[in-house]
Image: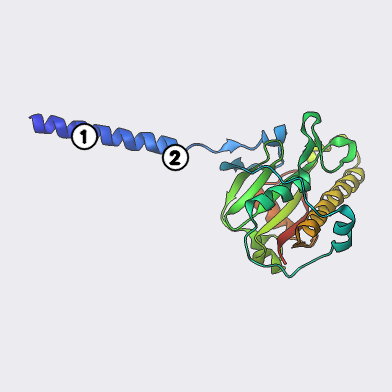
Amino acid sequence: MKRIILLSLVLLLTFGGVQAQAKKTNKAPKSTESVDGRTTGTTLKIIEDIPLPEPQMGLDTPLQIALKHRQTIRDLREEELPVEMLSSLLWSTYGFNRLEEGKRVVPSAVNCQEYDIYVFTRQGVYLYDAKKHALSKVVEGDNRAIISNQKFFSIAPVSIVLVANYDRMKMFKETADRDFYAATDGGYISQNIYLFCASAELGTVACGGINRESIHKLLGIKNGRAMLAHPVGMK
C-alpha cells in the first residue's frame, strides 16, 4: 500500500512539472500592435523579442567619403553580419535620433512615420522595433527567396523590406498624394541604407522588382505596400 501511494505521488509531481513546463514554453504569441507604440500593418503576432546591442554611432567614415563610395553592389557574400553591425544598420535605416521627441533619422511627410521595416534572415522574418531597438520575430524560417526572383536575395544574409503602412497615412485624402509621399519617404530610407553600407564596407542594392503579392501574404499586409527591398551583405 505504501509503495502504491509513493508511486502515485511521484507520477503526480512528474505530471505537474510537465504541465508547468508546457505552460512556460507554450506562451501565446504577443500582438504586434505595440511595436514602436504604433499600430502595425500586419495581422501576424510576435513570436519572440530579440534585443539588439547599442548601435555604434562613431563610424569613422566622413559623409563625403561615404557619398564617394556609395554604389549598387549585387555580388554579395553569404557570410553572416555581426550583430553589432546589424544593430547599427537598422538604427541608420529607421531608428530614433531624438527618441524623447519621437523623431527619426529620416524625415516623413507630416511626420506620419508610415514605414514598417522587416528584416529577412535564415532564421526568420523580424519586424524592427525602433523604440526598443529590438527585433520582433513574426515568421519562422528562411523566406528570403520569396522576396524576388533575383538570386542575390537568397544569398545575402540580411534583406530589409520597406513596407508603407497606409493606416498611418489617412490624412492624405487622395490616393495619388498618399502614394507620392510614401514613395518619397521610402527613398530617404533607401539612401540611408546605401550610405551606411558605403561607410561600413558592405554591399547593397535597392530593388523595386519584388514579389509583392507573396510578401504581403507572408507578412499579413492588409492596407499597405512593400515598396523596396535591400539585400545587404559583405562584398
Which residue is found at the position 51% from the left and 37% from the top?
28
Q: Mark 2: which secondary structure?
A: helix
Rendering colour mode: rainbow
Which residue is found at the position 89% from the left and 49% from the top?
184
- Please state the horizontal and vertical placement of residue 227, each as a whole percent of the image: 80, 53
105 on left or right of 33: right
Which residue is found at the position 68% from the left and 48% from the top?
87
Is residue 4 or residue 44 the one in the foreground? 4
**Amino acid type, label 2:** Thr
Judge whether residue 171 can be spotted in this image.
yes
For the view shown, which residue lies furthest in the left direction?
Answer: 1
Residue holding disc 2? 25
Residue holding disc 1? 10
Tell me if mark 2 has few (under 14), some (14-19) or many (20+) residues whose alpha carbon lies within 10 angstroms of its own.
few
Is residue 202 or residue 182 the one in the foreground? 202
Q: CA distance from mark 1 to mark 2?
A: 23 Å
Tell me if mark 1 has few (under 14), some (14-19) or many (20+) residues whose alpha carbon lies within 10 angstroms of its own.
few
**Amino acid type, label 1:** Val
